[in-house]
Image (tube, rainbow, N blue to C red):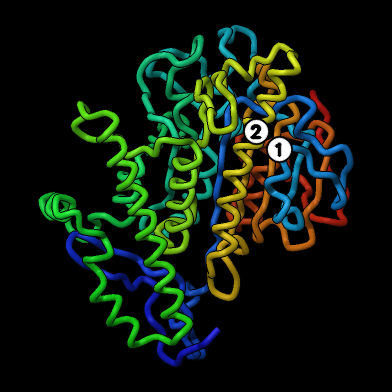
């Protein structure tokens, strides 16, 4: 790292026509002065990725524990990260088990319980109640230094009205984030809206300016190139290269959003405002994941929550030969063919996770990468989805904040609780909290330490 005597402020931005583009972490932001501003140090990031409908029985869990475990089919896409990845099995989410008087629906309890560690209130009305979700617990401490305290994204439109599972309001299946037990946060599924929120019109409150730029099909970067050129003259060669890569990444994402809008417009000419959603699941998922990488790189937020697949969704995956809807397939009835197809879907999802980790690992951040300075939690609220079972959940933890290189392994617990894992991860992030939902105490995930487990009550 090249240290300068005079540092660029970490909050320096490039401005243009209705545009404010934050900068990535540059060497020139670190001062050689004895009392350099501590805010220029690489920040910790926290990323949560949720997938519905659990795992296919017999396919997910490795047979052996420790660092030498054999990768199962759904874990093969993550092979490049096994040395800094924890595969956690034997962890339950008991708060999502049906209680006396609960309605028949088994999906409504899963996502809110997974995120908050509490049993949500069964209701089909607006008197819903869950718990403050773990991402928002983190945001209350980590979100004070960024433009957005947190970013919530989804791959499916969010509707809070009505009932989406037997006895449960749609809010329980359509969001992961709860600012308080009674305040759910919407999740953005439109790539254009997410992109504009990060880079679009934060430099101007005049919607006419934004509209003019869009009508002229001007790139966001066209409005800030003069500022970027001026900045290039005041930073070193490595910073110029990093800045160029960053701006090219923004342009690439913007181009993909535009392609999606054009495709939507061609296929659905009667729609006045194209949905701007890519036509295939991989394109869509990768676009939304890349937006999260950009948000981290520019330090626009340090917390992202991504619902890659929501409960009760019926998405098909023709690109991998799966024509049956995800929800229907998850109720496999122990049919070997259906379980194999579900395992194929599980593998498709971890392939998207691998793409995300690759992008984080390839993005420089201070003396390391974004992955070095992140904590990524991936998982589902179901174990075996056929019976809505919240035991033995499929869970992966990675990122240098929680797992150092060489510490990757498979840990099998004996009925530990997910809320206790959340509490552990909050500690890794430096979030001073003594409980998450109904947690009892942190789990051990560090190497060379005895594994703490919790016996079922």
Residue 339 horizontal/vertical position (percent):
71, 21
Q: Residue at x 60, y 38 (%)?
A: 349
- Determine whether 68 is above or below 40 in the image: above
Camera-side residue of 271 and 68: 271
Q: Secondary structure at mark 2?
A: helix
Tell me if residue 314 can be seen: yes
Residue 447 horizontal/vertical position (percent):
83, 56
Q: Local crowd at mark 2 within 10 Å, few (<14), some, or many (≥20)?
A: many
Residue 359, quarter of picture: bottom right
Q: Which label sits on residue 346?
A: 2
- Would you say the residues marked 2 and 1 are in contact, meaning their CB atoms lie under 8 Å apart? yes
Left or right of 27? Residue 274 is left
- Determine whether 183 is above or below 212 in the image: above
Left or right of 239? Residue 452 is right
Mark 1 = which residue?
74
Residue 256 horizontal/vertical position (percent):
37, 49
């Amino acid at each position: 790292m090249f240290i300068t005597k005079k540092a660029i402020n970490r909050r320096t931005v490039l401005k243009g026509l209705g545009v404010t583009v934050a900068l990535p972490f540059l060497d020139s932001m670190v001062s050689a002065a004895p009392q350099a501003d501590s805010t220029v140090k690489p920040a910790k990031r926290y990323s949560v990725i949720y997938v519905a409908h659990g795992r296919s029985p017999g396919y997910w869990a490795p047979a052996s524990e420790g660092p030498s475990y054999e990768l199962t089919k759904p874990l093969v896409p993550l092979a490049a990260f096994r040395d800094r990845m924890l595969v956690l099995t034997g962890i339950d989410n008991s708060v999502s088990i049906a209680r006396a008087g609960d309605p028949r629906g088994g999906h409504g309890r899963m996502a809110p319980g997974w995120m908050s560690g509490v049993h949500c209130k069964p209701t089909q009305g607006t008197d819903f109640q869950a718990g403050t979700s773990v991402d928002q617990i983190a945001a209350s401490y980590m979100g004070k230094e960024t433009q957005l305290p947190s970013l919530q994204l989804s791959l499916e439109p969010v509707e809070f009205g009505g009932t989406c599972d037997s006895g449960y309001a749609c809010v329980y299946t359509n969001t992961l984030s709860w600012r308080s037990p009674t305040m759910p946060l919407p999740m953005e599924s439109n790539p254009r809206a997410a992109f504009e929120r990060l880079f679009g019109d934060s430099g101007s409150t005049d919607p006419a300016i934004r509209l003019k730029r869009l009508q002229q099909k001007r790139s966001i970067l066209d409005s800030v190139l003069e500022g970027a050129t001026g900045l290039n003259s005041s930073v070193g060669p490595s910073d110029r290269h990093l800045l160029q890569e960053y701006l090219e990444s923004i342009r690439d994402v913007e181009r993909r959003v535009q392609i999606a809008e054009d495709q939507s417009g061609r296929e659905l000419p009667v729609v006045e405002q194209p949905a701007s959603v890519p036509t295939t699941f991989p394109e869509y998922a990768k676009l939304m994941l890349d937006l999260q990488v950009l948000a981290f790189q520019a330090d626009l937020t340090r917390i992202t929550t991504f619902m890659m697949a929501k409960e009760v969704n019926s998405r098909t995956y023709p690109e991998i030969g799966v024509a049956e809807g995800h929800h229907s397939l998850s109720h496999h009835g122990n049919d070997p063919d259906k379980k194999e197809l579900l395992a194929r879907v599980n593998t498709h999802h971890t392939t998207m996770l691998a793409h995300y980790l690759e992008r984080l690992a390839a993005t420089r951040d201070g003396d390391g990468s974004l992955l070095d300075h992140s904590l990524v939690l991936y998982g589902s609220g179901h174990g075996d989805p056929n019976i809505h079972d919240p035991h033995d959940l499929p869970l992966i933890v990675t990122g240098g904040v929680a797992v150092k290189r060489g510490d990757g392994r498979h840990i099998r617990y004996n009925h530990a609780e997910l809320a206790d894992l959340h509490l552990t991860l909050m500690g890794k992030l430096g979030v001073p909290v003594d409980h998450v939902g109904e947690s009892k105490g942190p789990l051990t995930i560090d190497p060379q330490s005895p594994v703490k487990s919790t016996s079922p009550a």
